[in-house]
Amino acid sequence: MLARNPAGGRRIPTLAELSEYPARGGLDLPPLARAAQGREFDAIVATVRWVDAYLERQVWPRKKLRRDLLARTPREIFEEGSICWAAPCYDLTCATAEVLRTQGFDCTLALSAMQRRTQSVELQFGIELELDGAPHFIGFGRTAKRVQQGSYTVVSHRKAVLRQHLDGDLFDSRYIQLFGVEGVDQVPELLQGFRPGKLRFRLGLLQHAFLLRRAHRRSIQRAREAEPPIVASVGRWQGS
């Protein structure tokens, strides 16, 4: 166990503690299986739910979007304790991967270029790892999280997938730099068609409290109806 105090003196918990961590959000969700019973999948789900409840989804001002989008280290994410509700996958990926790595899981960072129909290219971050002897991936959306067997693959709407194995002490590292770029503005060098300015503009239009509240309601609904591979977790939301 790698002892760390990411925020407010709270340390990252052990797997046994994670397995008992209650889901938040006012829902009567089924209890998690005890990780001590040996099934890695249950430990992963417990970790996803713990991180989801630790980091609060917030409306971000445009200045913070420009400064912090795809730019924070895991330590900074934990210390601030918040993420942008409309673009959660990078921060949730970094935070979750670091918790998993402290527990001994071998993780790979996956960066996908997503494009549907005539839309512009968007980015998707996630985690790949082996569970119970089979490849799995962890994905983070605005209103749902999933732990699913398989891996990120190129399909009609996923144009490319880049991978970086997570090795060494990365708690103070910016994950985006593992791909050889300084930040989001250099990502077009890796993924053709991605436009950072357009992403910031689109995310800026979504920074309204009523949109956050609507997404929160959707998250509650999806958690209530969740069946694998969707993780039954609401997360923590600004104002709730």
Image: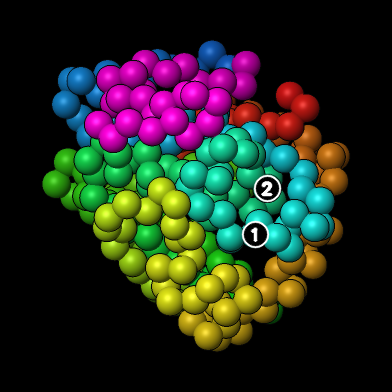
The amino acid type of the residue labelled 2 equals Cys
Does residue 159 appear anywhere in the picture? no
Relative to 5, is 223 on the left or the right? right
Q: Is residue 225 above or below residue 201?
A: above
Q: Which residues are magenta?
A: 1-26
Where residue 19 sits in the image (x, y, percent)?
Answer: 33, 21
Residue 213, picture quadrant:
top right
Relative to 28, is 134 on the left or the right? left
User: Does the magenta-highlighted stretch encompass residue 2?
Assistant: yes
Badge nearest the viewer, 1 or 2: 1
Where residue 193 sits in the image (x, y, percent)?
Answer: 60, 84
Mark 1, other Cα within 10 Å: few <14 / some 14–19 / many ≥20? many
Foreground of the two, 71 or 145: 71
Q: Which mark is residue 69?
A: 1
Give the residue at mark 2: 84
Residue at x 55%, y 77% (from the top left corner): 187
Residue at x 37%, y 16% (from the top left corner): 20
Mark 2, other Cα within 10 Å: few <14 / some 14–19 / many ≥20? many
Lower sequence index among marks 1 and 2: 1
Residue at x 85%, y 46% (from the top left corner): 208
Where residue 51 sits in the image (x, y, percent)?
Answer: 48, 34
Q: Which mark is residue 178?
A: none
Foreground of the two, 228 or 199: 199
| Coloring applied to the structure | rainbow
Label 1 – label 2 distance at C-alpha: 8 Å
Q: Secondary structure at mark 1?
A: loop
Relative to 135, is 173 on the left or the right? right
Viewport quadrant of the C terminus: top right
Labels 1 and 2 touching (C-beta < 8 A): yes
